[in-house]
Amino acid sequence: SLYQRHERIQCETVRPRSEQPIPTLILRDLSDGPATKHDLSETTGIHPRNLLHYIRLLHADGKIRIADWEQRTGPAVPVYAIKKNGAGDVKRPARITKDYRK
């Protein structure tokens, strides 16, 4: 059927995530300095939710690290940087409680 043919062609042409150009874009942007997924989204034009798959892949491969955490309102957001000299991830800060805000 046409659907099966389309599905077969799509499976043959889709490259694994690690071979797609998006990780290259992320690494290029991080070479300019640390950035959050939202910063990377602005420069690449890719939605943060879609970028997160590639960020996790690069983090698992040891190419990037969590250099800092940015906290405005809501949960802290990791700030990513290219991994250099074996530097590790910065631990997530404690949540801001209502008592602390007073």
Image (spheres, grey):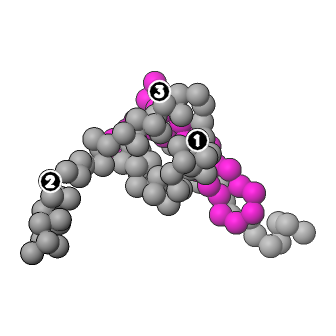
Q: How many numbered circles are shown?
A: 3
- Give how far across and how far down residue 50 sits, in percent: 45, 57
**Rounded to the nearest whole Å, what is the CA distance between mark 2 and mark 3?**
36 Å
Q: Secondary structure at mark 3?
A: loop
What range is drawn magenta here? 60-86
Badge 2: residue crowd in 10 Å (few <14, some 14–19, many ≥20): few
Give the labeled residue for mark 1: 43
Instruction: Identify the mark nearer the N-term, 1 or 3.
Output: 1
What residue lies at 50% left-to-right and 60% top-to-bottom?
49
Q: Is residue 81 left or right of residue 70?
A: left
Q: What secondary structure is marked by label 2?
A: helix
Quote the CA–CA distance across marks 1 and 3. 22 Å
- At horizontal 12% and vertical 62% (from top left) the residue drawn is 8
| Residue type indicated by callout 1 | Thr
Quickly name the residue at label 3: 84
Quadrant of the frame with the C terminus: bottom right
Above or below, comparing residue 83 to residue 13 in the picture: above
Q: Which mark is residue 12?
A: 2
Q: What is the three-letter code of the residue carrying label 3?
A: Lys
Is 41 in front, or is 59? 41
Rounded to the nearest angstrom, the CA distance separating label 1 from label 2 is: 30 Å
Q: Is residue 4 above or below residue 27?
A: below
Outermost residue, right side: 102
Q: Nearer the viewer, residue 88 or 11?
A: 11
**Residue type for callout 2:** Glu
